Amino acid sequence: MRITSSTKDLPRLRADLVVAFAFEGQGVPAGIADRALRTALAGVLRKERFRGRPSDAVLWNASAARRILVVGLGAEDAAGRIDRLRRAAMRAARKGLAGRARSLAVRLPPGASAEEVRAVAEGVCAGSYRYDRYLTDPEARHPGIERVEISSDVARHEAQGAAGVAEAVGRAVAAARDWVNEPPSRMTPVHMAEQARRIAQEAGLAIEVLGPAQLERLRMGATLAVARGSRVEPRVVHLTYRPNGVARGGRRVALVGKGVTFDSGGLNLKTGTSMDHMKGDMAGAAAVLAAMSALAQVGCAIEVHGFLGLVENMTGADAYKPGDILETHSGKTVEVTNTDAEGRLVLADVLSWAHKTARPHAIVDLATLTGACVVALGTQCTGLFTRNAELRDQLLAAAEAAGERTWAMPMIDEYLEPMQGGPADLRNTGERWGGAISAALFLAEFLPRDVSFAHLDIAGPSFVERDSPDGAQGGTGAGVRTLLRWLAGP
């Protein structure tokens, strides 16, 4: 997809689908100078009882060669306006795909900002995503939206810069979605490590890939235990981004992604319905890899290390068992009380190795870690767990700017107690209640207390089970936009 910017009025825009926005109570989108077009469009909207609510959209076939879509934005106020524009652009792109549009032209409301240009461009990228690699019917496959023109009152060079960043972010999000959507027998730990090698070559990243022998030497016993039930070997990947002109020894950040490419639950086997979308249990690793791929393009000026813990959790003859005691990279031991709490075991090793290898000033993990977080926050919100107020505020601000709903959750130390006191240093599960908090506390035990650490539980928003007006079924790329906002700023 190629995104360009302009300052054209709506009548001068030419595309398979032209998009305009209207706020609640507006009878017609503001800023249309052509009186005849404004009058005709107002009549259409009135007839269709368009009110400008976020759920409202009217498609007008103005002529055989001209289709205009008007999408509602809700109340005309500053609060949430940018995110409403982003989501309206998603819906517009979805309408374009449904109509087999190859080009899209979008006119922003008068007085729009460069930030709003970026939001609309991100929305178009997200809404135009489709995963049709395995469809054999040519009629079912869509060539996709290839050209997008975003028109606004913003100075063209400023708007084009914002659109260019959005395009890079959009490609990264789409890559994460592709990796999650790929069938799990293809997207194995070995194959995902190969994808990381490809990304490293394309993006100019240093890369190190560890196999079983190296993991054994590093005493990553928890990761090796989870992988034992699968015929596919585990991999742990370390990617490094160092921007030009940044001296070693400056600020460093580490990102860690859970990459369980399929999770059967191990011997604590999941039910059939719970296993349906477990190819998506590597969405954290996909988000980290995708974010690493776009750091240079979004202008990240700090050193960033990305770590991926890649395994399958299967039920083979050598599968690890409840009651096993595992030795981790940190030296701490863990008693297995549930083999379906495997992601935290992999992260325990990788977090510890990331800290000792990169010595980062801040470390953030992304993981589809707990169903408990989905119970608490639903399917559209990420849970943020940290003891560091500064890091919490930074990530919340980045998530808000990125349009990814995120909520700060508590770290209640007393919830750690049920995981202590057994035959090992820790158990890998706590009490039933507060399971998302217990999991975050477990992870924090494998880092020194003074490390600036945050855990993002993306179990809810990382995968959607059906198509919606906002996007396609499958992986969502949750967390990619937040990470890139945090690392590169606005």
Image: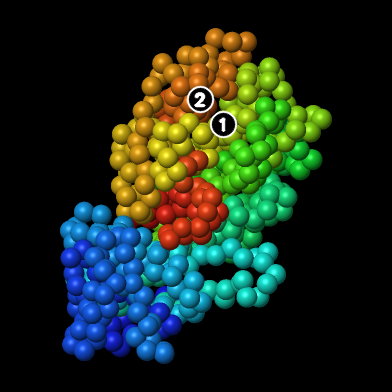
72 or 398, which lies in front? Answer: 72
> Residue 216: horizontal and vertical position, in percent?
72, 32
Q: Amino acid at mark 1?
A: Arg
Q: Where, by quadrant of the figure, is residue 357 drawn?
A: top right
Q: Is residue 27 visible?
A: yes
374 or 125, which lies in front? Answer: 374
Residue 54, compared with residue 62, is above or below; it is above
Residue at the spot 61% in from the left edge and 14% down from the top edge? 424
Q: Where, by quadrant of the figure, is residue 142 drawn?
A: bottom right
**Disc 1 designates what residue?**
344
Residue with the most extreme right position = 317
Residue with the most extreme front position = 47
Badge 1 marks a residue whose secondary structure is helix
Q: Is residue 263 left or right of residue 435?
A: right
Cβ atoms under marks 2 and 1 closer than 8 Å: yes
Q: Is residue 324 left or right of residue 473?
A: right
Q: Is residue 486 visible?
A: no
Disc 2 residue crowd, few under 14, some 14–19, many 20+, Cα 10 Å: many
Q: Where, by quadrant of the figure, is residue 17 drawn?
A: bottom left
> Residue 243: horizontal and vertical position, in percent?
46, 58
Q: Amino acid at mark 2?
A: Phe
374 or 296, which lies in front? Answer: 374
Q: CA distance from mark 2 to mark 1?
A: 7 Å
**Disc 2 designates what residue?**
442
> Residue 111: horizontal and vertical position, in percent?
19, 71
